Image (cartoon, grey):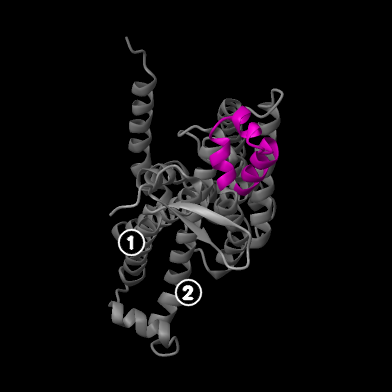
Amino acid sequence: MTSPHPWFALRLPGLRASWRLDRRVPRAVGLLILLGAIATVIHLTQGDYAMAPPALLETLMDPGGDRDRAFVLGVLRLPRALVAVAVGAALGASGAILQGITRNPLAGPGILGINGGASLAAIAAIAAWPGVGAAQLSLVAFGGGLVTALVIYLLSWQGGSSPTGLILMGIGITALANAVTSFAIAFSDIYAANQAMVWLVGSVYGRGWEQLGPLVGWMAIFGPLACLLGRELDVLALGDDLAQGLGSRVERGRGLLLLCAVALAAAAVATAGAIGFVGLMAPHLARRWVGASHGGLIPVAALVGACTVVGADAISRIWFAAVELPCGIVTAAIGAPYFLWLLRCQGSQSGDRP
């Protein structure tokens, strides 16, 4: 006999907290972890220096065995693959939060200006301090994303923050940030301009353990916080008036959620540049699998984003080995048609009916 509702309660021992999750969430999480593991193994084993999965396992268990294989795996491929997974997870979770805050399926870190602000700050830091470290760059990008989000939040304030205003102001700020970035690139030397262009497209090429550490640190703080605030997102989805009637502190909750989204997106941009469309696509795919409840949607969207970026980087590294195509180009090639299809669906749903 099936359950009358597709939900179950998740409770953590010792905490006065519980989560109501769709029963499809564990199955989706398990499937996505399997897909991500397969994509990661392909990423690690294929390429100019190919190795069989048993050799991969042997090298992971005994790094001191084959030195060439240990160098290729431990220095070149493994940190790069893990960075791709972490960047995709951060962008996917950030997109799910932003779509929940704005109640708009077209929202995302790139559209709301967070990517643009973080990218502008990061490129300015690279130009001013060529030897800037990964941890400092993460802080600078976070500051740029946070300032951008604060400006958007204040400009959209009309006796309270407006979800529609957030979208419109975000589009305008994105255009302004892109214009300033293009102006800076136009007056840079050829090497700096080329580096900036790769950054704007988004790539995990050359990323190592020093870039992975700061990114994981940001995710360890704001990822769990976003999941804990998932119930608040579900309440905000009902509308501000009803949410206030249910006892929700709307502006405080929205501000904390926006902070989480900014931190995750800015950390990802600081690590890999502005990889596009992941924050837009991942929440939609996750929503089709597990429904709209954010307690399960946020982690599933993070896993979808992780699979997307590590898969895109594997394609760019293996199929386009001669040119090392940035993975942001692959995600854009997949995401742009999906975005156009989404716009068409939104237009048909909102069209006039007799």
Judge left or right: residue 162 versus residue 2. right
Residue 328 in picture, x, y percent from top left = 43, 48
The residue labelled by disc 1 is 35
Q: Residue at x 55, y 33 (%)?
A: 102
- Between circles 1 and 2, the one closer to the viewer is 1
Q: Amino acid at mark 2?
A: Val
Q: Alpha carbon of mark 1 to alpha carbon of mark 2: how far? A: 24 Å
- The residue stretch that appears in magenta: 231-260
Q: Nearer the viewer, residue 108 or 162?
A: 162
Q: Give the quarter of the figure containing the N terminus.
A: bottom left
Give the farthest residue toward the bottom: 65
Q: Toward the viewer: 52 or 61?
A: 61
Q: Position of residue 93 (x, y in %)?
A: 51, 50
Looking at the rendering, which quadrant does residue 150 occupy? top right
**Are the residues tagged 1 and 2 within 8 Å (C-beta)?**
no
Describe the element under mark 2 as helix, strand or loop: helix
Q: Residue at x 64, y 32 (%)?
A: 245
